[in-house]
Image: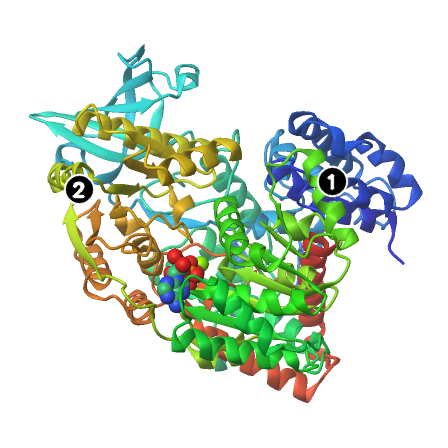
């Protein structure tokens, strides 16, 4: 029986998730109100404020959610489960000698599940409310709120060492400031900074007028951005910054973690909160016995958690990440292995050769032999009674969609419905258009379901799916999160799997349809079969005829003008150009806007005035995004500046140039996918990787993309080059949303963890052994976290 306190805990997470995903009523299957209806009566009254949620505007929703969350947090300790007694806490059992004596141990392991509002550790007055927004409600959440990435701030450059065109991180004190409007009406904020040696630079921000209320003389800032040097004057166009208000030196002179955050929750604060917690916390008990740690070359959980927040060195961090990843994968594999049923039955479809012939007639081209082979494997699965669970892997542009369309047609001809889920709205719309083109003439009735539709449009689309009037639904993950009811879903196709987790996939496949996952990210066959849990693999290993190789060049930022001159020549020849810029801080909503606006502004200065420049970023309303994409397709835009929203699937054959700024900030596979946006038409195509720094490492990595055209080879070399010592962020607690990218980079750890999981379960299927008691608790905790998050 779940107690009231349990229920409150379970309510908190999905509501936080909803809050974080922008209050679109999409984060919870069936919507927020459906969740409320499932609550026991005392809580229903608490959540009564959420009545009519679906009808509210996102702004109103936010207000209501925050109120309910605040209430949940403040009442957390009130009733239900007995809480630990107040007063002095018993010191935890110390079972390992190293370093523990020195720590204050006010907080024992059992206190970790207490809500932050209990103030066992001083994390600041505003903390519980603000932290709730990033999903942190308890001390355990805070302990596992891990940096997403790291910056090496052990030796920040003096201002005099800054070189033109590079992206640098510096620290300095504000000595002057001024805000003004530019000729084009943009707000420009400048702050004069002085470094420890007395040298000066000017930091520049565009379109962030509120900075006038935040940045004052005397403030110390840590900021990164692009350096512009004119003679002896240097300017930094700021891409991201922190106000360094901490007196404990947590934010510089060391490797510094950058945490997932939200507006009003500063990085310096998050570091301090983590520091306080770790200082107050006794030894974190390990759920793995020491013998196992030794055998798998793992450090203790306690060491790992401390190091991942405040790494002493790269090696320290990489050992910590290895331990935490190992845990993630171990628990993931334990959960998968325990829930696995290889004989789940799915649909048995009949394949009529006449249908395939009709489809081939409509298709504007012949399937390649590689596509034919892939389709044969898929159709064999669909004809078998066992549930299909297949990964269709093929390089960008290899023609996966046409293969999927054939499978969809077969399902529909069998009287079933099909769904296709894509990771972004733009991609969903494009799939929708393509599938319409192939399938509408064959009588297939399709619906598009995306977040941006009006409630009325959505209702009628859903009604047509429920009644069976529509055969195919194409959409983003709104498709599963809203719990769209199908009359009879027989085939689910999921594109670009690397953004979806196993649990999300499972919630789409509740009704046991056959499942086809499409991805352009190559993964080794052995990993697909052994590690992915439950997918079998089909590879499209050839390209459609007539593909032009894309010439790829690697240049550094100093040669940008030359590159844009070349791009302009292409525009004059009638072609179109993509310019892609990385996201600097994905946690801060505005950076995406700033990055693209800044770059577009830059290009307006570089390119002739008649250049038609468009901007596309993920924060734009969907209607506006569509309009920009449509304008680009119509060739009303010559140069499209965007973030990676165009990464997947976009298909404009007249675009022949892809310029990627700060290319070093992308993964190599991602660069390869971006490059796949050009070279789709009859014209010679070009990809230019602009390196923002001049390091050997950057040069070496980017050369791989420049020299190779095969996505598989690129992924393998990326893996070899990166190795485990890479400073890369780690994930949140709970079972990982295992992605294909993880499979490529963490293959070895995954296999090791999976082996161990298998042996553990063979020896002890229910994990009853005394040594495994902590392991069992942790497995349950992580599985529940996922259940609540995705399936409630
Ligand atoms: P993927 O999803 O694998 O990246 P798409 O399915 O989007 O690739 O196909 C890329 C492009 O190639 C599309 O414009 C599509 O119309 C075209 N295409 C697909 N298969 C063939 C084929 N057999 N012959 C010629 N063109 C093809
Ligand atoms: Mg595709």
- In x, y percent, where is residue 253? 31, 43
In the picture, the quarter occupied by the N terminus is bottom right
Q: Residue at x 63, y 47 (%)?
A: 478
Q: Is residue 577 above or below residue 338?
A: above
Report ligand 2 position as a quadrant.
bottom left
Please, what secondary structure does the residue beneath circle 2 have? helix
- In x, y percent, where is residue 434? 49, 53
The residue that mark 2 highlights is 570
Q: Is residue 200 above or below residue 158?
A: above
Q: Residue at x 78, y 43 (%)?
A: 86
Mark 2 Cα-neighbour bin, 10 Å: few <14, some 14–19, many ≥20: some
Task: Measure the alpha-carbon separation of dots 2 and 1.
Answer: 45 Å
Q: Is residue 28 above or below residue 227?
A: below
Among the 4 quarters of the image, the one containing residue 714: bottom left
- Residue extending farthest to the left is 231
- What numbered label is drawn on residue 459? 1
Among the 4 quarters of the image, the one containing residue 235: top left
In the foreground, 178 or 79? 178
- In x, y percent, where is residue 593? 40, 31
């Amino acid at each position: 029986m779940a107690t009231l306190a349990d229920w409150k805990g379970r309510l908190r997470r999905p509501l936080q998730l909803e809050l974080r995903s922008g209050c679109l009523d999409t984060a919870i299957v069936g919507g927020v109100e459906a969740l409320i209806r499932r609550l026991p009566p005392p809580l229903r009254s608490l959540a009564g404020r959420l009545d009519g949620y679906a009808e509210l505007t996102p702004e109103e929703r936010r207000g209501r959610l925050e109120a309910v969350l605040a209430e949940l947090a403040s009442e957390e300790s009130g009733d239900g489960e007995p809480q630990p007694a107040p007063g002095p806490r018993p010191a935890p059992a110390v079972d390992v000698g190293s370093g523990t004596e020195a720590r204050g141990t006010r907080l024992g392991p059992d206190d970790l599940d207490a809500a932050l509002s209990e103030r066992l550790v001083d994390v600041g007055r505003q903390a519980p409310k603000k932290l709730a927004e990033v999903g942190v409600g308890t001390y355990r959440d805070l302990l596992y709120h891990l940096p997403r990435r790291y910056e090496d701030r052990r030796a920040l450059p003096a201002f005099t060492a800054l070189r033109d065109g590079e992206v640098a991180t510096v620290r300095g004190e504000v000595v002057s400031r001024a805000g003004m409007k530019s000729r084009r009406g943009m707000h420009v904020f400048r702050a004069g900074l002085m470094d420890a040696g007395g040298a000066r630079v000017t930091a520049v921000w565009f379109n962030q007028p509120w900075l006038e209320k935040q940045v004052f003389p005397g403030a110390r800032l840590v900021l990164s951005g692009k350096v512009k040097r004119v003679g002896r004057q240097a300017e930094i166009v700021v891409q991201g910054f922190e106000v360094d208000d901490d007196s404990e030196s947590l934010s510089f002179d060391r490797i510094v973690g950058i945490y997932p955050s939200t507006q009003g929750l500063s990085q310096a604060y998050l570091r301090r909160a983590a520091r306080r917690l770790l200082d107050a916390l006794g030894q974190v008990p390990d759920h793995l016995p020491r013998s196992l740690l030794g055998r798998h070359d793992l450090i203790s959980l306690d060491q790992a958690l401390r190091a991942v927040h405040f790494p002493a060195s790269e090696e320290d961090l990489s050992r910590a990440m290895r331990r935490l990843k190992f845990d993630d994968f171990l628990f993931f594999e334990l959960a998968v292995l325990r829930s696995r049923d290889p004989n789940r039955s799915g649909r048995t479809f009949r394949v009529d050769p006449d249908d395939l012939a009709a489809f081939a007639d409509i298709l504007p081209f012949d399937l390649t032999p590689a596509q034919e082979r892939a389709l044969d494997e898929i159709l064999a699965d669909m004809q078998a009674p066992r549930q299909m669970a297949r990964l269709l892997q093929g390089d960008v542009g290899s023609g996966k969609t046409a293969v999927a369309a054939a499978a969809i047609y077969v399902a529909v001809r069998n009287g079933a419905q099909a769904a296709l889920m894509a990771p972004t709205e733009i991609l969903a719309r494009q799939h929708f258009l393509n599938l319409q083109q192939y399938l509408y003439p064959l009588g297939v009735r399709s619906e598009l379901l995306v977040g941006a539709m009006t409630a009325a449009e959505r209702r009628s689309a859903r009604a047509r799916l429920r009644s069976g009037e529509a055969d195919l639904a194409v959409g983003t993950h709104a498709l599963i999160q809203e719990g769209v009811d199908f009359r009879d879903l027989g085939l689910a196709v999921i594109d670009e799997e690397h953004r979806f987790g196993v649990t999300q996939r499972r919630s789409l496949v509740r009704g046991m349809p056959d499942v086809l996952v499409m991805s352009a990210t190559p993964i080794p066959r052995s990993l697909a079969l052994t590690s992915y849990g439950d997918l079998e693999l089909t590879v499209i290993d050839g390209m459609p005829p007539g593909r032009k190789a894309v010439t790829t060049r690697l240049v550094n930022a100093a040669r940008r003008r030359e590159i844009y001159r070349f791009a302009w020549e292409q525009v004059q020849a009638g072609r179109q150009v993509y310019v892609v810029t990385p996201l600097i801080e994905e946690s801060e909503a505005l950076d995406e806007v700033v990055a693209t606006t800044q770059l577009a502004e830059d290009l307006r200065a570089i390119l002739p005035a008649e250049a038609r420049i468009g901007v596309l970023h993920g924060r734009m309303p969907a209607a506006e995004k569509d309009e920009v994409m449509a304008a680009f397709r119509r060739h009303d835009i010559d140069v499209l500046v965007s973030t990676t929203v165009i990464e997947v699937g976009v298909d404009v054959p007249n675009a022949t140039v892809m310029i990627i700024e700060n290319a070093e900030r992308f993964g190599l596979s991602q660069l390869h996918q971006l490059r796949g946006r050009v070279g789709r038409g009859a014209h010679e195509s070009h990809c230019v990787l602009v390196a923002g720094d001049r390091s050997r490492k950057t040069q070496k990595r980017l050369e791989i993309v420049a020299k190779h055209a095969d996505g598989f080879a690129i992924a393998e070399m990326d893996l070899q080059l990166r190795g485990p010592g890479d400073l890369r962020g780690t994930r949140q607690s709970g079972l990982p949303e295992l992605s294909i990218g993880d499979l490529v980079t963490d293959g070895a750890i995954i296999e090791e963890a999976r082996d161990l999981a298998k042996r553990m379960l063979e020896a002890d299927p229910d994990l009853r052994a005394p040594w495994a008691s902590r392991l069992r608790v942790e497995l349950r905790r992580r599985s529940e976290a996922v259940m609540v998050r995705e399936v409630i």
